[in-house]
Image (cartoon, grey):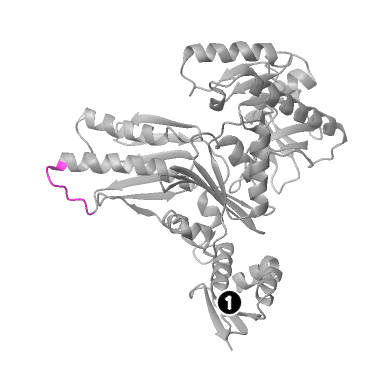
Amino acid sequence: MNQIIINANKFKTRAVILENKKVMEIHIEREGEGTLNGNIYKGKVANVLPGMESAFVNIGLEKNGFLYVKDLREFEEKYLTGIEKSEKPIEDLLRVGDDVVVQVLSDPRGNKGARVSTHYTIPGKFLVLMPNNSHIAISKKIKDEIERERLEKIFKDIVPEGMGVIIRTAAEGKSIYHFEKELEYLTKRWEEVELKIKKAKIGEVIYKDNGIISKVLRDIINNDIDEIVVDNEEVYWEIIDYIRAFSEGKLRTKIKLYKDKKEIFDEYGIQKEIEKSLEETVWLECGGSIVIQKTEALVSIDVNTGKNIGSLNLEETVVKTNVEAAEEIARQLRIRNLSGIIIIDFIDMKIEEDKEKVIKALENGLSKDRVKNNIIHFTDLGLIEMTRKRTGKPLSYYFQDECPHCKGTGKIKGRRAIVESIIKELKEVIEEKDISHIKIITKKSVKEKIEEIYLDFIKSLLGNYGKTIEILDNGKELIKDYEILMER
């Protein structure tokens, strides 16, 4: 059974994909902290770098966006010079102070600003509209040549002149009715963007991709999803409305409103999986293990036999461990949302057929990954190199902070994650009748985070049960995260 489990409250929304009760993907959006990916901004050129064939664009964020000349060509053709396939250098196209409209390709990370482009895209369920590009592209995951020809013929007839589309995998087998309906919707959204461009101020968002719930429904929900379970009634009706508006009427997915007192992520075993996925070491069923370490430059993954001593011979033990590791690595990349360059050091194998088994297991595991990835065969050093496209933030971003003492060489539990644990524990004891006052003793940084964002909510929560709250600073940062004391 494939399920989507959704937890939504005042501070965050989380959607988790389960395949046969195993966590495969975790999507998180905090209030006021959604991904910038896909947003279109009115920007101003802050600096032009001829030697790097690029420019920095002020889009109202802390760091300027990075615009490469190749990501500027369609904008140049339509709005600047009108020249097709131009080879003009960037210094002849942009000057400091020029207005330019850009779309975020990748969120800011570390010391780097957002990567931006003028190759605009407006995504839908069956297609992605490219308003400045007349090209028609078809998802490589649609393999049937007859189906590819059918889709190309349909879209050549219905796409507005001067525009193009990327036909998504979900379009396979669908009728022209679905495409016309969505194309009309996406074209209208682009027309709204064009109207806003002239009036918009520098740094203003003139198009925003939908929030996490809409993205999950648009990109994931299909007949492979058997059930959606959500613990928020407002979100429940949002899902119902979306399905009524955009589904074909044949969707078999059941939608349930979860009302039990037990936290929904505890009920489905998700919280434990999240905690496991924040650890460096992942244990395999065979007794082996994988160690995942993320650096600024790349992600390194090391496979070990660990406790797996085998029952036949060394080569067979090694292959069995490597195959199981490959399957788990594909899952962990999705759960942790790891991206960029990934280097995997499997246990050494001598036979070429065994290496092919491991590659096949990794490919099969990543075949359901909606994020683009590319696997390169074993290198001369016996390593597998692969890449995975950056989309959103890694799981660790939402649960871990940089340690103030080692300055990034280690990780500690994030302040917000600690506060969420405190709130969860308060909910568990809130109905105890012989308790009237609760003290929370925690680190100074956590106390400050509670007072900054959560205090009114916690006071209201406890006030409904006639209880008062007091938050104390323990004056230390290295003891346990918090302590809750209950008084009569």
Q: Residue at x 62, y 84 (%)?
A: 437
Question: Could you tell whether 396 is left or right of 13 in the image?
Answer: left
**Labels in figure, total:** 1
Q: Three-letter amino acid code at disc 1?
A: Glu
Task: Indicate the position of residue 410 as horizontal and vertical percent values.
Answer: 46, 60
| Magenta stretch prevailing secondary structure | loop
Question: Could you tell whether 93 is left or right of 349 in the image?
Answer: right
Task: Indicate the position of residue 272 as horizontal and vertical percent values.
Answer: 43, 59
Stretch in magenta: 307-314
In front here: 224 or 372? 224
Residue 299 visible to an observer of this rendering = no
Residue 200: image quadrant is top right
Residue 167 visible to an observer of this rendering = yes
Q: Disc 1 marks which residue?
A: 431
Tell me if residue 109 comes above or below residue 223 in the rendering: below
Task: Indicate the position of residue 480 as horizontal and vertical percent values.
Answer: 48, 74
- Give the residue furthest to the right: 199
Q: Tag 1, which secondary structure?
A: loop
Q: Residue 310 colored magenta?
A: yes
Image quarter in which the C terminus is found:
bottom right
Q: Residue at x 41, y 48 (%)?
A: 22
Task: Indicate the position of residue 291 as horizontal and vertical percent values.
Answer: 35, 50
In front here: 325 or 100? 325
- Give the residue furthest to the left: 312
Tell me if residue 412 comes above or below residue 67 in the rendering: below
In front here: 22 or 450? 22
